[in-house]
Amino acid sequence: MALMAVADALNRVLAGAAPLPAEAAPLAEAHGRVLADDVAARRTQPPANVSAMDGYAVRAADVAVAPSKLKVIGEVAAGHPFEGTVGAGEAARIFTGGVLPPGADTIVIQENATRQGDTVVVTSGAGKGKHVRAEGLDFARGAVLLNKGRRLTDRDLALAAAMNHPSVPVHRRPKLAALATGDELVMPGTSPGFGEIVYSNGYATMALARREGCDVIDLGIVPDRLAETAAAVRRAHDLGADVLVTSGGASVGDYDLVQKALAVEGLELSFWKVALRPGRPMMHGRLGAMHVLGLPGNPVSAYVCAVLFLVPLIRRLAGRTDEEPQREPARLGCDLPANDERADYLRATLAPGPDGIPVATPAAVQDSSMLTPLARADCLLVRAPHAPAAKAGEIGSIIRLGP
Ligand code: AMP
Ligand code: MG
């Protein structure tokens, strides 16, 4: 199978993926999720004319000439409406959020009034409607204020609550199972024997998946044996994973059993070689409804492939339409040689540039096993296949890496 271009591979990954079904998410769990339906206001806000200030509810006609003396006939506070009606020559003490009593049409702020027992002297008049928040000022019952497809911001949650929704219809969170393969892998904090290495790549990809809104099932490490690998794949399937992400063993070496195990379980393979660096042995397919991404074992390759393919897949499943990693311009911090047929994603740091465009400087050594430059990198500097040699200061394209 020839190497597939990154864009074609991504198209394949996304072509088979649709937003997951809707569920009602409590507002406290809905931040960043995507609405599966329009949300209409269940009430009018404010539900009545209310005072925006502390002061006195009056008839504008009574305070057209100042000073004017009015009889105080009652008190209104937020949540405690006043039963009576404000007649000519009368006023009601009112506090912010209090419902404007019938008869009154204007608020005189307390700074412009002097209380004397059960009367108040208004020292400075107010035009009709002053400091009154009219019923429906914010929104009216039935108005659709949050549309299907919207990714909910923190402010949207407050709005939905004010619209009287305890929960909102959003696409279900993707459930992602992560599986590492390799006889040489041991858990961090143990005492690795000769030839063993510490399992690392999953910690980055699982954190990335969680940041993108997945529920993550950590299936741990399986040895390079077909039966165990196949059993773990089955487990992911039985647990109802929407996405299975494997790492390592994705090539066709004697100990690369992920493809074979997936084939045994009935994988419909879509591709397993992509024209990129790092990360050529990158596999994709479907096992029933479960999307399968086989990431390379090398931690840097695994992470870069997760940024390029897993993140867009998760976003598509979550209902987002901004699936692809955003590209930004940056100036090259050093000269770069011409590129070969594989797209290159160089780990690079960013510094502010003199003209406002950031300067991206790739790490001197770009080895797909090296975590130090990956951890220090602020971005991936993208080199297209066959990109010609470029000089420091020229404009390139970057993908920023998250926190
Ligand atoms: P593989 O793709 O299985 O051939 O692995 C490629 C390289 O990545 C080998 O040097 C592995 O030891 C290493 N590797 C594989 N899986 C992991 C992992 N989960 N964490 C760290 N390194 C890994
Ligand atoms: Mg391996």
Image (tube, grey):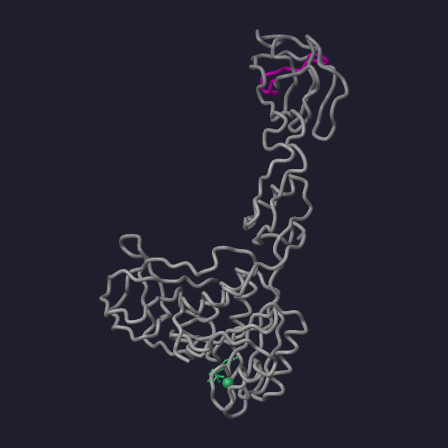
* Residue plotted at (55% across, 73% down): 245
* Residue plotted at (61% across, 80% down): 265
Q: Is residue 32 left or right of residue 349?
A: right
Q: Nearer the viewer, residue 28 or 76?
A: 28
Q: Nearer the viewer, residue 303 or 151?
A: 151
* Residue found farthest to the right: 83
198, above or below 65, in the image: below
264, above or below 20, in the image: below
Residue 362, horizontal then vertical, whole percent: 33, 69
Residue 65, horizontal then vertical, whole percent: 57, 6
Residue 172, horizontal then vertical, whole percent: 63, 58
127, above or below 39, in the image: above
* Residue plotted at (47% across, 78% down): 296
Instruction: Count numbered badges in the picture.
Output: 0
Which image quarter: residue 234?
A: bottom right
Which image quarter: residue 47?
A: top right
* Residue plotted at (22% across, 66% down): 391
Residue 78, horizontal then vertical, whole percent: 70, 29
Q: Is residue 76 left or right of residue 275?
A: right
Q: Nearer the viewer, residue 160 or 376?
A: 160
Which image quarter: residue 238?
A: bottom right
Q: Is-magenta flag for residue 154?
A: no
Q: Quadrant of the N terminus?
A: bottom left
The boundaries of the magenta stretch are 108-119
Q: Nearer the viewer, residue 46 or 333?
A: 46
Q: Is residue 39 left or right of residue 364?
A: right
